[in-house]
Image: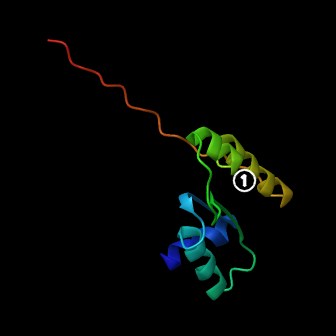
Amino acid sequence: MKKHLYSRSKKHGKVVTIEDGVLRGGLASNILELMNQHSFKEVSFIGFGYPDEFVKHGTIEQIEEKYGLTEKQMAEKIQKEIFQKGKELVPIKQKKAKKNKKKRR
């Protein structure tokens, strides 16, 4: 994992994690620790997840909105970070779904 993280983060200059849980002690913490140990100084990091505090009850949508975890909020934060650093946003190409053609007899 270290080699993969290193090569990808050097190539793109960014690491983004999204967790369905608390950031502290999760994937984000592990990635940050690894980046610190190996001096990833030119790589920026964005971690999405819940803070280490009591989360009040509500619908999933309400809770995600409060903590900036909606798809729109996360996309905006990532784009803001990319454009502030003068990087070009490169869209991800999606594979087209193959049409299921049945042969007629």
Q: Position of residue 100 (x, y in %)?
A: 31, 25
Tag 1 residue: 78
Q: Position of residue 63 (x, y in %)?
A: 63, 46
Residue 7: name its quadrant. bottom right
Residue 92 visible in rendering:
yes
Farthest-out residue, left:
105
Labels in figure, total: 1
Give 56 or 68, whichever is nearer the viewer: 56
Give 99 or 42, whichever is nearer the viewer: 42
**Side of 1 relative to 82 (left or right):** left
Residue 104: name its quadrant. top left
Give 46 or 5, whichever is nearer the viewer: 46
Q: Position of residue 74 (x, y in %)?
A: 68, 49
Residue at image coords 29%, 22%: 101
Task: Indicate the quadrant containing the C terminus: top left, top right, bottom left or bottom right.
Answer: top left
Residue at image coords 68%, 43%: 65
Q: Is the residue marked by circle 1 packed among few (<14), some (14-19), or many (20+) residues within 10 Å? A: some
